[in-house]
Image (cartoon, helix red, strand yellow):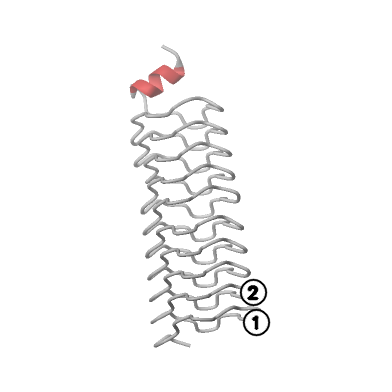
Amino acid sequence: MTKIEIIRAGQEKHFPGVDLEDEDLSDCQLEQINLAGANLVGTDFSRSNLKGARLDGANLLGAQLNLADVRANLVGANLMQADLSNADLRGSNLRGVNLMGAKLVRASLAGAFLSGANLTGVNLEGVDLRGTDLRGVNLNSANLKGANLAQADLQGANLSEANLEEADLRGANLAGANLAGANLLCAELERANIVGITLDRRVCLLGTSLSKTAS
């Protein structure tokens, strides 16, 4: 059997550092597989089950992960331009991950750990980010329109020029966050911690609900 056939059959789970560039691993049962530090550039994991997998340090540039279960360890992984549309990332460890140019439309990131991640310019419209650890994350120019950020920890995050129109930030921790030039049109900020946030005259607060915020 070839390496790909062995992986697809689930006969082996230990492949750290393996080169699987542009391989087709769609619709596979890959729970608990170890692909730490692997070359997964352009690999197709569409609809695959990667729950509990080790993908830390892996290069997933342009990988296809749409509709996949990626509740995995992705610490320090490169997910630039990856397609994570409709992916299940709930509770995943994404600390320090590079997600620039990634597609996350309708992905679920509730309870995920994203501290220190790079999400510059990423489209997160309508994404579920409830209770997510986003401390120090770079969300410069990101599209968070209608995103659910209730109870999220955004302490020290860079949200400059971000689109937060109609976003749910109720109970979120925004202490020390940079919101210069952000669009907060009709955003919900009830009970949010806004101590030490950075605003400027370009910030749009029209229709924003700020009742009972901590400032």
Reply above or below: 191 against 3. Answer: below
State left or right for residue 49 relative to residue 113. left
State left or right for residue 140 relative to residue 83. right
* Separation (CA) of disc 1 from disc 2: 6 Å
Whichever of callouts 1 and 2 sits on the residue coming sooner in the sequence is: 2
Task: Identify the residue at image location x=53%, y=33%.
Answer: 40
Who is closer to the viewer here, 189 or 131? 189
**Secondary structure state at the residue bearing disc 1:** loop
| Residue linked to disc 2 | 181
Q: Quadrant of the N terminus?
A: top left
Whether residues under marks 1 and 2 lie with C-beta atoms below 8 angstroms apart, the answer is: yes
Task: Identify the residue at image location x=64%, y=74%.
Answer: 181
Image coordinates for residue 126, horizontal then vertical, percent: 44, 59
Who is closer to the viewer here, 123 or 117? 123
Image coordinates for residue 56, horizontal then vertical, percent: 48, 43
Label disc, if present, on residue 127 of the rendered structure: none
Reply above or below: 125 against 11. Answer: below
Label disc, if present, on residue 200 of the rendered structure: 1
**Secondary structure state at the residue bearing disc 2:** loop
Task: Identify the image quadrant of residue 22.
Answer: top right
Q: Amino acid at mark 2?
A: Gly
- Are there few (<14), some (14-19), or many (20+) residues within 10 Å of tag 2? many
Task: Identify the image quadrant of residue 91.
Answer: bottom left
Reply above or below: 195 against 43. Answer: below
Farthest residue in the right direction? 201
Q: Amino acid at mark 1?
A: Asp
Image coordinates for residue 200, horizontal then vertical, percent: 65, 82
